[in-house]
Image (tube, helix red, strand yellow):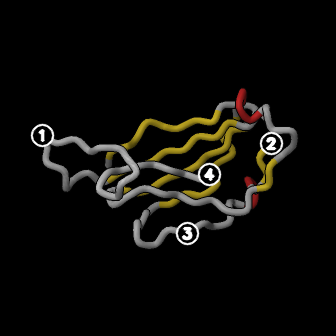
Amino acid sequence: DVAMETLYVEPDCTMGWSEPLTVFSVQHHSHFMGLHQEINVERDGVNLGSMRKEFVFDYNHQSGVEPNNALRTLFPGDRLHASCHFDTTSVPANSTVQIGEESNKEMCFPT
């Protein structure tokens, strides 16, 4: 299990929202090495939990799902952080995994 550096949307950015956002769907996307992903919400420095925690990511079965009901509404000032984990056991020790849009490369794209 290899984790990609956590991706953040800082409060400075979300403070630019003119009003709260209602989230209808949360979708994770990576390629064939994608193992699991998670998007968490912090409000006033308190981690409120995961909008969607995907324990077993499957490249062939990707879809959006409704977020955790308690986190359906995001507010200006919220901090979002996404983490992505990959199974790289098939990669030879002297190789690297390239990041990119092509499916033979890897990516982390939580939406």
Residue in the picture at 16% in, 42% down: 95
Q: Position of residue 71 (x, y in %)?
A: 73, 53
Q: Position of residue 38 (x, y in %)?
A: 53, 51
| Cα–Cα span, label 2 and label 1 | 45 Å
Classify mark 4: helix, strand or loop: strand
The residue carrying mark 2 is 75
First in sequence: mark 1 vs mark 3: 3
| Cα–Cα span, label 4 and label 1 | 35 Å
- Residue found farthest to the front: 102
Residue in the picture at 49% in, 45% down: 83
Q: Position of residue 19 (x, y in %)?
A: 87, 43
Residue in the picture at 58% in, 49% down: 39
First in sequence: mark 4 vs mark 3: 4
The label nearer to you, 4 versus 3, is 3
Badge 3 density bin: few <14, some 14–19, many ≥20, Cα 10 Å = few
The residue carrying mark 1 is 94
- Residue 50 is marked as 4
Q: Answer above or below: position of 90 versus 6.
A: below
- Residue 63 is marked as 3
First in sequence: mark 4 vs mark 2: 4
Classify mark 1: helix, strand or loop: loop
The label nearer to you, 4 versus 1, is 1
Three-letter code, disc 3 = Ser
**Residue 65, located in which quarter of the rendered image?**
bottom right
Q: Answer above or below: position of 68 versus 50.
A: below
First in sequence: mark 4 vs mark 1: 4
